[in-house]
Image (cartoon, coloured by chain):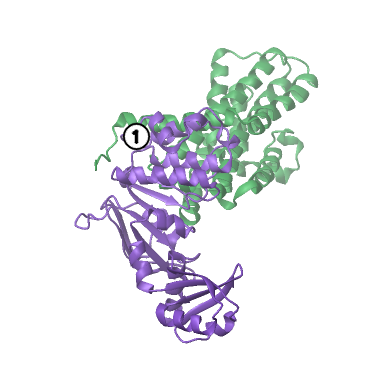
Amino acid sequence: MNASHPPVAELVGVTHRYGTLTALDALDLAVRPGELLALLGPNGAGKSTSIGVLLGLVRPQSGRARLFGADPQHVASRRRIGVMLQSAALPATLRVGELLRLTASYYPAPRPLAESAALAGVDDLLTRPYGKLSGGQQRRVQFALALCGRPDLLFLDEPTVGMDVEARQALWAAIRSLVGAGCAVVLTTHYLEEAEALAQRVVMLGQGRVLAEGSVDALRGRVGLTRIRCLSDLDAAAVAGWTQVAAAQREEGRLVVTTTATEAVLRRLLDADAALSELEVRRAGLADAFVELSRQDREAA
Amino acid sequence: MHATTTMSPRRVAGAYLQEIRSECLRYLRAPGFILPVTLFSTVFYLMFGVLLSPPGSDASRYLLASYTTFGVIGPGLFGFGASLAIEREGGLLTLKRALPMPPGAYLIGKMVMAMGMGMLVVVLLLVCGLTLGGVHLPPSRVLAMLATGALGVLPFCALGMFVGTLLKGQGAPGLLNLVYLPMAFLSGLWLPLRLLPRPLQAMAPVWPSYHLNQLTLAAVGVGRGALLPHVLALAAFAAVFLALATRRLRRVG
């Protein structure tokens, strides 16, 4: 999408170390205009440091970071971004409307207050002190603050932590409508289903490097894994030892087998257990792909 | 995609004003901050300067000055130091640095808040002193007190800011009190300096509160000697601690 346009945010060969720990290892990353990019990876993979460098909070030890072609540490380049961090204790005694007005004042052409509030679903909270809100409501307010400046690029760091299912769905809908209107989004999340639901492109980080990138489907396809679930008395440990089986375990009383050779393993399963029932075969999700890619990376290292 | 990244001077000024307004509002609504900061010095003055000193006496005039000094230090140290320590821990400072907040707005917001609180402390003490304490001050001296209060906060903002960069979270008020109370004592704010042991008297000019006290004493008309050295000493304290604090903030965030 818009691959010919210059990226809205970019890391070029960025390396950053904390003591002996390498957080980013010659990392290249580009966010294209209007795309929703999900940044995934286990703790310590370099997600937070990448975001910190892109926001100008961390000055990289080598390589460079660009926001709209300029240094993120210049305030002008940050006037086109919106930010929702993982944790930010906003002043408890300020009212939601006051927080919105304050944050909007940093931007050249912010949305009208009512529009920001409606987009984030906080219109009924405007006169409430921030400290009196529930955790989920506070997250929605932080989302409203992120979008109030009419940004072209939105950084959302674990946006739905602490939200119930309904609130999460509502936030997803809001994110989709912003992306529909041309806003690029960088999303980090622990919920892989969130990335599956929203992301056009996924970048998986591990040990400060890009392990894999592509669409959700492409990443799933890349690992070529299938999950076979069935009701069977076969010993999971024994099945795990079969050739071409990546993993086998019991989940909720069912045998779950992950494999790259679906047909061969299925045939062997059916031969081994005539009483096998409730057979289910599906392509592995992002979570499986993720585990597999991390495993491959560790083995390569 | 629009590409407006330039802000009109009017909007930049608006951002500074919003920041100042928010900073003042949040503390005016926080009784846990505003009551101790304003009432400490007022209650002390009522006890020692009004109840235990004859109305209109030199003591009540002298104590008006020294409790003003004591009261003015509080908003600087705590308004700046404690809130900075808490906001560094809670992630608010990080968020503000990521947002396109005009550089300096964060510090200026807190500074104006502290100056306003400093003036409020002076007004409360003046009301007590001029009515109950029987102290007579011409309008020029009242204005001098207000100006000393408003500007005298600043070196302590810088000191508070530095302490606020040393540790995060709720530990800061404790450490600030360890600075505040001994420093007040050693600068002669509670007992006149001449009642302290000689070595402590000789050491007094080390403390910024000593220099501020010389200015408030002069403002109520009991000071002696030149004022400029004290003003310069306070400016130097402010500059040094501001430099130390910004350096630490840049390093540790």
Which residue lies at the image location 56% right of the left edge and 13% below the top edge?
B139
- Number of numbered discs on residues: 1
Q: In the rendered structure, which amino acid carries the disc numbered 1?
A: Pro
Residue extending farthest front: A274
Can you say whether B222 is above or below B7 in the image? above
Residue B17, picture quadrant: top left
Spot occupied by residue A101 in the image (x, y as percentages of width and height): 43, 31
Spot occupied by residue A90 in the image (x, y as percentages of width and height): 53, 40
Q: In the picture, which quadrant includes the C terminus of chain A?
A: bottom left
Q: Secondary structure at mark 1?
A: loop
Spot occupied by residue B87 in the image (x, y as percentages of width and height): 55, 45
Residue topped by disc 1: A110
- Comparing A232 with B68, the one in front is A232
Which residue lies at the image location 59% right of the left edge and 25% below the top edge?
B218
Can you say whether B52 is above or below B95 in the image? above
Question: Chain B is which colour?
Answer: green
**Residue A9 makes an appearance in the image:** yes
Chain of the residue under label 1: A
- Comparing B64 with A25, the one in front is A25
Residue A175, picture quadrant: top left
Question: Chain A is which colour?
Answer: purple
Residue extending farthest right: B52
Q: In the picture, which quadrant includes the N terminus of chain A?
A: bottom left
Spot occupied by residue B82 in the image (x, y as percentages of width and height): 60, 42
User: Is disc 1 surrounded by few (<14), some (14 to 19) or many (20+) residues within 10 Å?
Assistant: some
Which residue lies at the image location 49% right of the left edge and 80% below the top edge?
A270
**Residue A75 makes an appearance in the image:** no
Q: Is residue A51 left or right of residue B73?
A: left
Q: Is residue B36 left or right of residue A245?
A: right
Residue extending farthest left: A4
